[in-house]
Image (spheres, rainbow, N blue to C red):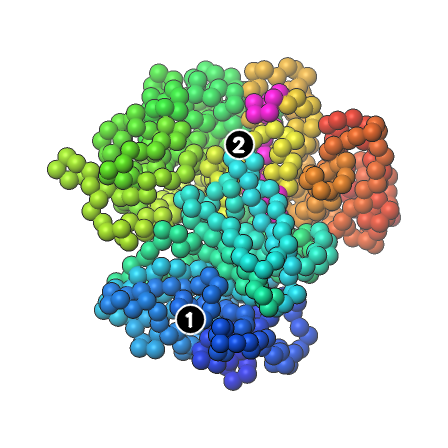
Amino acid sequence: MSVEVMCNEQRFVLETANTAYVLDIHEGGHLQHIYWGKKLAHKCDYKAMRPFVIAHSSFEATRGVMGYEFIPWGEMVYSEPTFKASNSTGERGFDWIYEDYKLETVNDQLTELSLCLTDKLGRYRIQLIYGVYKEYDMISRRLVVINESEELLTLEAARSLQVAFKPGQVSRFTHLAGKWVGEFQVIQETLSEGRKTIDSRRGNTSHQANPWFAVDTDATEETGDVWFGHLAYSGNWDIHVEKDAFGLVQLCGGMTDFDFSKVLKANESFETPPFFIGYSENGFSGMSHLAHRFQRDVILPKDHRDHLRKVLYNSWEATYFDVSVDEQKRLAEKAAAIGCELFVIDDGWFGERHSDQAGLGDWYVNQDKFPNGLSELISHVKSLNMAFGIWVEPEMVNKDSQLYDQHPDWVYQFSNKNHTEARHQLVLNLGKKEVRAYIKNWLGELLAKHNIHFIKWDMNRAFSEPGIVEKSHGALNHTKMSHEQQQLWMEHVTGLYEVIDHIKNKHPHVVIETCSGGGGRVDLGILQRTDQFWTSDNTDAVDRLSIQYGASFAYNAKAMMCWITDSPNWLNQREVPLTYRCHVAMLGALGVGGNLDHWDDIELAEAAKWIAYYKEIRRTVQEGNQYRLASPTISSRTDYTAIQYVSEDKEHSVVFLFEDGLKYGEQLTLITFKGLDPEAYYKDQSGFKATGSFFMNGGIQWQLSKQYTSEIYELHKCEE
């Protein structure tokens, strides 16, 4: 069984293949966290565990200071609450009493434990639902709140995760931070007394932070205990980690309570997004292996989960808004000639879209640019043995558009305040059913009329003026109370998911890439619906090393899009050799985004060579285990970055080596590998043969000769 109930049904043990998670029903019905870590040898070991409770003073809870599984607001517990609500009679706090539990086998992968809490008057019910993915060493947690009374219940905080760590168990907090063109930077901080919060209040997951965390005590890439978690939600969120004076660490996360409200009428319910958590005793690499495999096998959409990602060409950096059918056809021919398998036309194909100042929202094909419609280009692309893809930004509108002229009430706004425009655009209110219907209609029609394999779904600004207005006698006015409008943040996400799910169901052959100016909307919620993500608008190869390195902590290489683009790069004006640019882009799902009209024959031939080689190794890159042998961070103290991929069966390995800050002349460096079969023999490209043990302990020598040196080292298992 994945779930054991013991100690007179007061203790619950959730076991995966290698880990265990234990919680208690504490005196008075409170839920107490007991243990999370390595699976124990015998069931009696779990029974022998003692709750960790510190009795202190009248300034702390009378039951003592302890680690919680659920923190209701209003008691003598001052960490972030798991749940906070009020009702229409003015009550602001409730006694939540444990009532019972339920076990359910959902499918071969998943067993669920549901713990039911009720307020003492029996009006409201909370279900804490734990999902155990035994094979994957992952656990999910979410809340369901049910109003069984006749009065309104207003939710003010409802977080999916609450967990605690005993004194000394964890000492470091790892998260991802950044900005546009600088996403996924790894931040590691020592936990000290006080509270650390990472969050987004922007309407999407954001470039500035990501809803992922890890905690550890002096773990390395290969050794040590690491606990981690991913929130599956694409809107406003927060994660709080707090260490108290006793050394206890409380960690909670989910939908943020910032400008949040959800009103439940009689018999209505509300479900929070799941938080997926895991534990590894094999350091940060072990953590990533668990997360990556779980994403590939369980999270990514079913229809394309088992498919390798195609090598794509995107025309944005070649043409920007200056789109024409002839130019696109010429680029498609060059893309096909170097081995690309998917041609994607980006912004500028629709409406009066000649810059970012107009046309957004008017999703009809521009007849001046495409006199014969899109079919002419699509047919040409198909004749070149490539699939066709297209860029869209369904959640946005320009003021200079037919859509805005007709429906000014469809955007978020305050009735007595000017709009804040970003990129000359406003955000459509996906909480409105007519907005969702409009998007489903034009996007569904586009896909029905054309042979489109791929959509790049973009979102190029964050929210502002989060208000809802309606047309009334020619004026725009607020018709909802403030607490009702506070629901718009999550209603937008719910609406987004509804639209994407609708498109996926109607057109299951379509691959969708999520993009928000790069990595502004990457999380397990959007990845349950989209097949890959655009990592960053920054395509500079040197910057991309650290961006992709950070993303790899939380997200798998199969879903991570990486492009080869021009040199000098548009952002940094940095000149980088094509070989180096190709190798960096081969670390995930490969794409090309440069202006092929500017590449000479030598460059085109070299790109074709690396694309062909990538196709030989891409299964290992996209579906293998990744090892960060040497990082591209300032603190790494190496002159190189090394990233290794090993196939699940350990038959094949690819190691990418990059110069990273060479100084004081040429350097000879020793690099040892990971994840090989120590008893088996492997052969490299030159024919050199040795055991996996040799490569993992003796290693190879690599000569660093100059700036932007890069090399790929490949191993195949062979006979002795």
Relative to residue 516, is residue 251 depicted above or below?
below
SS class, disc 2: loop
Residue visible at 61% across and 17% down in the picture: 599
Left or right placement of residue 626 versus residue 694 in this view: left
Relative to residue 68, is residue 261 depicted above or below?
above
Q: Residues within 10 Å of mark 2 (few under 14, many from 20)?
A: many
> Quadrant where the N terminus lies?
bottom right
Q: Residue furthest bottom?
A: 8
Magenta segment, which residues? 550-573
Amino acid at dot 2: Asp
Relative to residue 108, is residue 319 depicted above or below?
above
Q: Residues within 10 Å of mark 1 (few under 14, many from 20)?
A: few
Residue visible at 28% across and 53% down in the picture: 483
Which residue carries the number 1 mark? 75
Q: Which mark is residue 537?
A: 2
Residue visible at 34% across and 24% down in the picture: 358
Q: Residue 55, percent across and down?
A: 55, 78
Q: Nearer the viewer, mark 2 or mark 1?
A: 1
Residue visible at 66% across and 19% down in the picture: 603
Amino acid at dot 1: Glu
Looking at the image, can residue 290 be seen? no
